[in-house]
Image: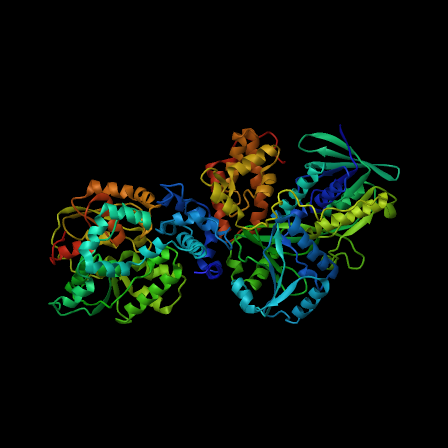
Amino acid sequence: MSEKSRAERAQHLRERLNNELNRMSLDQCVKCTICETSCPVAAVTPLFSGPKFVGPQAERFRDGDSVDHSVDYCSSCGTCSVVCPQGVNVAELNSLARAVMKAEHGVPIRDRIITQTVLMGQAMTPVAPLANAVLDNKLARFAMEKVVGVHRGAPMPTARTQSLHTWLKKRPAPAKAPTRGALVYFHGCAGGYFEVDAAKKAIEVLEHLGYEVLVPPQGCCGLAEQSNGLFEQATKSVRALVKALRSAGTDLTIVSTAGSCTGMLKHEAHEILGLHDTELADVGTRIREISEFLMELHEAGELPTDFEPIKQRLPYHAPCQLKSQGMGTPAFDLLRLIPGLEVVDSNATCCGIAGTYGLKKEKYDIAQAVGKPLFDMVKQTEQGLAACDTETCRWQIENSTGVRTVHPIVLVHQAYGLGAVTP
Amino acid sequence: MKRLETDVVVIGGGSTGLGVVRDAALRGYRAVLVERVDLGQGTTGRFHGLLHSGGRYVVSDPQSATECAEENAILRRIQASAVEDTGGFFVTLPGDDPSYADQFLAGAAKTGVPATEISVAEALRREPRLHPGIQRAIEVADGSVDGWQLVWGAARSAMSHGAKVLTYHRVTRIEREGGRVSAVLCRDEKGGEDIRIECSFVLNCAGPWAGQIAAMAGAREVEVVAGRGIMIAMNHRIVNTVINRCVYPTDGDILVPVHTVSIIGTTDIHESDPDHLPIPRDEVQQMLDAGEAMIPGFRTARALHAWSGSRPLIKDDRVAAHDTRNMSRGMAVIDHSERDGLTGMLTIGGGKLTTYRLMAEHIMDAMGDQLGENRPCRTADEVIPGSEDRRLYAVTHRLEEREADRLDDPIVCECELMSRSMLVDALHAQPNATLDDLRRQLRLGMGPCQGGFCAARAAGIACSEQVADAERATGLLRLFLKHRWIGLWPILYGPQVRQTALDHWIFAGTLDVEHLPHPEQEVVR
């Protein structure tokens, strides 16, 4: 990109952001510091000045060229906005400031690569054993850290030999005819390529409940691009996804196992990317995170609870980007319906990974320090298994504790007698 | 009694006085400035922060317009660190007469004020919060200027040329020998002693108080009409460009982005006592309405602080005494030798902060005329200390500075990003300063929390740095909070109420500031 067009894009973005309602919300800040005491990043490193500092405070000093590059130490976990009692959109302000900075200064190649999740899945699936071997190889990871800037210790997804859509094409038709009508299923990039097992099981649970599950071809929600300040790319991604999800029907409930991507569709694309598309609003209104959906059924008395017991203690972590959806922790409530299952809430703010944050070599140690209380808790309570709603958080927990970590739906699947947790 | 001897005593530590003492020093006169309180505590610290392009006066006052345009360019050159190049728009709001813009452009061309009409779309692109229904937009070279940085810069310049600047020195008497001024007597309010300054000339730059000073010298009454105006600082920069309403000058027609806030102003009401300037509720409402007319949603934005300032207009026979709006903004120099048979004293009034340097040049020329000397003015060419790099101020500067030192230097005032070392340096340089004195120089407590979080920290640091004992530190804190309150109560609505409640809980509930040990006599300065 030429310098001139970069400057123009940055200026354009700054002009837009100056007029954002998010920016207006800084007027509500009374400096109480609750966000700072809740911020998982500021708690472990002085490199991040804290959400109040880089958010409502620094924003009053911003005009034109970015000068506070440390805003990039924000992991975008969104905790500050959740805890703010005055309604300041702290995390949103930080994301916008970072986007302007990235537009001015350019985005490292590394950040462009690690946000291309669909591409990674497409490339790795056909050569899964080889890809996994490479990602397990210390020398290869060392080279990757040096050349690309992805920390050698950071969690990497495991490639699968079969994508979800290949499985969908090859599997026999569901045995039971649907009794409850159709749903659209949103699996996210991870569900399509890496977390295929959880995605399959989600489909099987929904079918078991009597739904016809429509799975339109779908791409990435753009969240990773957005949190890396690549707003234009993120906008394209989320709009394409909205179109794909609407292609399966414009009045069906959309059910998702991609916890953080659900938040992107529900509120982040609107609040951070500034998209006011009615189509996005439509999808955002119809989408339910899968545990949220099942608990809504439960509250309506429509969820069968003929669960087989699972006698186990299970550490459960509700990810930061799930909490920011303002729906409580439905997976925690859902798992507690399973007899014998002793679900222990991690009560941890964040695992540290925050999408792609903890992959970066300059942030890896911070991310590990952020996640430490969670890792300790998992290690102390686990009996071979932990649960968490979002993919990258599961990889982070597994990588840092050695404890197999699954999507909560996998346990629901087992409790319905649809199959045991597979290794 | 302490004695000093000098050529010129300048009375008044506002922009006029500092401009004059600098000019005098640069012309080689020995000069002493006396100010009854701190620098820039009167009119200079109570304006809306506008560095005029001249645009506002192109129709109503062409001479002022030209002077503003010229001085605007000079200040950017010599005092860059006090000036921000915000640019300005004159916009025709829905319902305003669009043909006024033609008069405006014609006036601008005649007066040499740079002005270019831009498209409404361009204006809205650059300032998206402007009323979308604006009819026309003209771009001018408005800026914003920090009055305190301006006067302190001029003070440093004057002092570097041998001048003395004595703050908290209240004039108690002006002595004359026959028809000539011979000495100025002052009370050093902080040091508690009297001081006699023998001089051959007195320059009365006391602004709204100039009439009182002239009376001390036994001059016939100089009628200074205090034209009071209120201003309200909003919590953030709602705009980054000065927004002027393109109409004949009226109330509430300017919104200025200054530092981290935007200031709406102002009204113009005749007041008799410049020491007691009210901030009436109806005028607050009037300003919010005026802001709303330019920026839809303005009323729902957070107001931070309100204040009242007084224009020092010398009464002009051409207009009625109550009509301060239409009194000339041009400066007036009163030569008491012709008027009162008193030589060695000049009184100056009128003018505006943008033209402070030019006013000083005029008064010094008038002094030279009376003395029969012709020393050339050098103030337009010499760069003021602190602006040697000629880098104009930008709102991002403090954020940039804290980005560099944040890991080593704690931040005391979070809202205005004032570091601990900034405060400590100032405390040691001015150990007698009140927190308000430091506020004017450092912006301590001028942000959203209005001292709620930083004032106690600052008082504690004054104590730990052994600049004040515990009792005085408490006294300083209480004085600071009292002064903040004056500007808070008139705008207590919306988020600022919540802030003020939280601040009150902190001070009254947690710190019990009303019952801390404090000096026998309340700290007042």
Q: How many marks?
A: 0
Name the quarter where the N terminus of chain B is drawn.
top right
Does B31 sit left or right of A300 as displayed? right
User: Which color scheme does this rendered protein use?
Assistant: rainbow
For the residue pair B451 and B425, the one nearer the viewer reads as: B425
The residue under the point 18% across, 65% down is A166
Does B496 sit left or right of A208 as displayed? right
Res. B424 image quadrant: top right
Q: Is residue B47 above or below residue B39?
A: below
Res. B18 image quadrant: top right
- Residue B214 screen position, x and y as percent: 79, 43
Does B466 sit left or right of B190 as displayed? left
- Residue A234 screen position, x and y as percent: 36, 61
- Residue A218 screen position, x and y as percent: 27, 66
Name the quarter where the C terminus of chain B is drawn.
top right
Instruction: State whether residue B35 appears in this view.
Output: no
Instruction: State whether residue A419 appears in this view.
Output: yes
The residue under the point 60% across, 29% down is B520
Does B317 sit left or right of A360 as displayed? right
Q: Is residue A103 above or below residue B342?
A: below
Q: Is residue B236 above or below residue A252?
A: above
- Residue B358 screen position, x and y as percent: 73, 51
For the residue pair B426 and B384, the one nearer the viewer reads as: B384
For the residue pair A158 and B318, the one nearer the viewer reads as: A158
